Image (cartoon, rainbow, N blue to C red):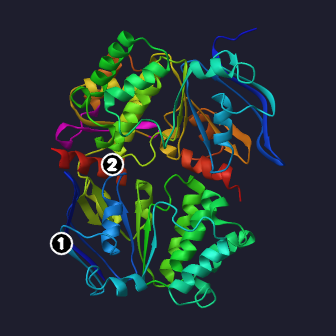
Amino acid sequence: MKDVHKVIIVENLVKKFGDFTANDHLNFHVERGEIFGFLGANGAGKTTAIKILCGLSAPTSGRVEVAGFDVRTNAESVKKNIGYMSQKFSLYDDLTVFENIRLFGAIYGLSVSEIRKRSDEMLHRLGLVQERNRLLRTLSLGWKQKLAFSVAIIHRPGIVFLDEPTSGVDPVTRRQFWELIYQAADEGITVFVTTHYLDEAEYCNRVTVMVDGKISALDTPANLKVSYDCATMNDVFLKLTRPN
Amino acid sequence: MISIQSLSKKFDKIRALDRVTFTVNEGELFGVIGPDGAGKSTLFRIVLSLLLPDEGTVSIWGLDPVRDYRAIRKIVGYMPGKFSLYEDLTVEENLRFFASVFETSIEENYYLIKDIYQQIEPFRKRPAGKLSGGMKQKLALSCALIHKPRLLVLDEPTTGVDAVSRSEFWSILQKLKGFGITIIVATPYMDEASLCDRVALIQKGRILDVATPSEIVAGFKDKLFGVSGGNMHHLLLACRQFGGTATVFPFGEELHLTFNGGGDSSEELEKYLKTKGVEEVFIRPVSPDIEDRFMALMSRHQE
């Protein structure tokens, strides 16, 4: 039976590379419209898990359902129904702002008129109307990241995966970026986000912390702080990832 | 002492550095703090004699990076932001290579790198390209230190690194400072400012402030309030609509806001938020941190 409120269901997910277990029996679900923070130390297995959730890598065992589709048997449907923004590469530097939007709109199968309409809305919302025909590489990192996010949800996916979207961005832009995340969540898009800025963990509805391939905590930021007797999410993170 | 005077550099029309001026004292752990694109790497490359400035001068204990570049390269250690060691040489070969370039040996200054190198020594026969991010970072730092530099320049050593490894890296820097090495480190993480003796805040090629972390925070003169209650996004929009607020930013679990004129209109705001249906409004005075100050300086410079 399908549970329409759960857009991500992960049950006993295991991923092994040879003898190495990168994901060790992960269990969690993500609700529609939720902002879900996915935290962990470098090498804890976050990227492996995200690749599986996006249908790019098959689990060794376990059940993973994203946007109502099984990632093992229906990976292509998963890819059509999600958005993805990586920290490193998201848009083409040698295309203009509009060319980037048109390219990704077309990849997601939108019609020309639909691309035009959504592009206008997007540029208006971002205050980038004047920059429509500028080469992407002439934009600041902050603008690029905001645009990349908007492009990642141009096809109105049920879920968007953001992999360290605010790395290296200035503190004001970082907050503007989170306002875009809030807007998307208000519109019913589920946001799955990783970050190394632990103040941003506070902006999530729920947060999970991965340690050595396992999920060692999963709750609201407020509950995590109470359970681990910490003042900030930074302290919670340190306590979980470096227990001694 | 390192003295940087009115340094400017343009790339086409982009002003990467705009009259950057500050000094770093001997033995100091000095932070250059700002986002990507602020000009940190350009600044470092000029100081290290790898790039020519359009205008301005740099003096490193009296040496000029343009005229005395050979002498300068002997006394500085540099860890670039991008991993730049030889990926097809092993860990040990890389270290030995850098030692030989600087006409020294691994053994001669081993005490400097011992704590760091011991963590990667089990992998000394592995090609550097096959190391994890954290191990590459430790190897790069070892190579930058092998000739016992008087000045160590680190360009974003902690970017993309998790909170635990970041704090470990900073304890390594504290230890190196104890050996008398002057350290200049760039970072986009504002919270790392408090770990430096002094910092320069930089944005769009311009220095916003140079001081000790506590002096920088003390420069925040407006009254700052933390506001919480209900859904964060709705609260944020409502606080902006109130009209009497100068700045409103999400800040961890609450909003940080200032009122027009830097005063206190929290009672009016609380009443307003209640009419907007925000339940359990909680407003409290809070102490600013470096990030609050940085954002205030940013908006002032944009006007």
Q: Is residue A150 above or below residue B45?
A: above
Residue B271 in sight here: no
Residue under label 2: B292
Q: Badge 2, how many Cα within 10 Å: few under 14, some, many 20+?
A: many
Q: Mark 1: which amino acid?
A: Gly
Q: Quadrant of residue B240?
A: top left
Is A232 colored magenta in this rendering?
A: no
Taking depth in this image into account, of B303 and B274 the one nearest to the observer is B303
Q: Which mark is residue A110?
A: none
Q: Position of residue B228 (x, y in %)?
A: 42, 32
- Which numbered disc, 2 or 1, marks the residue that appears first in the sequence? 1
Q: Is residue A35 left or right of residue A132?
A: right
Residue at horizontal 48 percent and vertical 60 percent from the top: B82
Quadrant including the C terminus of chain B? top left
Which element is circle 1 on?
strand
Secondary structure of the residue carrying tag 2 is helix
Q: Is residue A189 above or below residue B80?
A: above
Q: Alpha carbon of mark 2 to alpha carbon of mark 1: how far?
A: 31 Å
Let me know if residue B253 is in the magenta part. Answer: yes
Q: Locate residue B235, reporting x and y percent.
A: 38, 26
- The structure residue drawn at horizontal position 68% and vertical position 36%, both measured from the top left corner, is A49
Quarter of the figure with the N terminus of chain B: bottom left
**Along the line of sight, which residue is nearer the eye, A39 or B108?**
B108
Identity, as a three-letter code, of the amino acid under mark 2: Asp
Q: Residue at x 30, y 40 (%)?
A: A139
Residue in the picture at 68% in, 47% down: A44
B273 with respect to A24 (left or right):
left
The magenta span reads B252-266
Report the residue marked by disc 1: B56
Above or below B290: residue B237: above
Above-or-below relation of B295 to A65? below
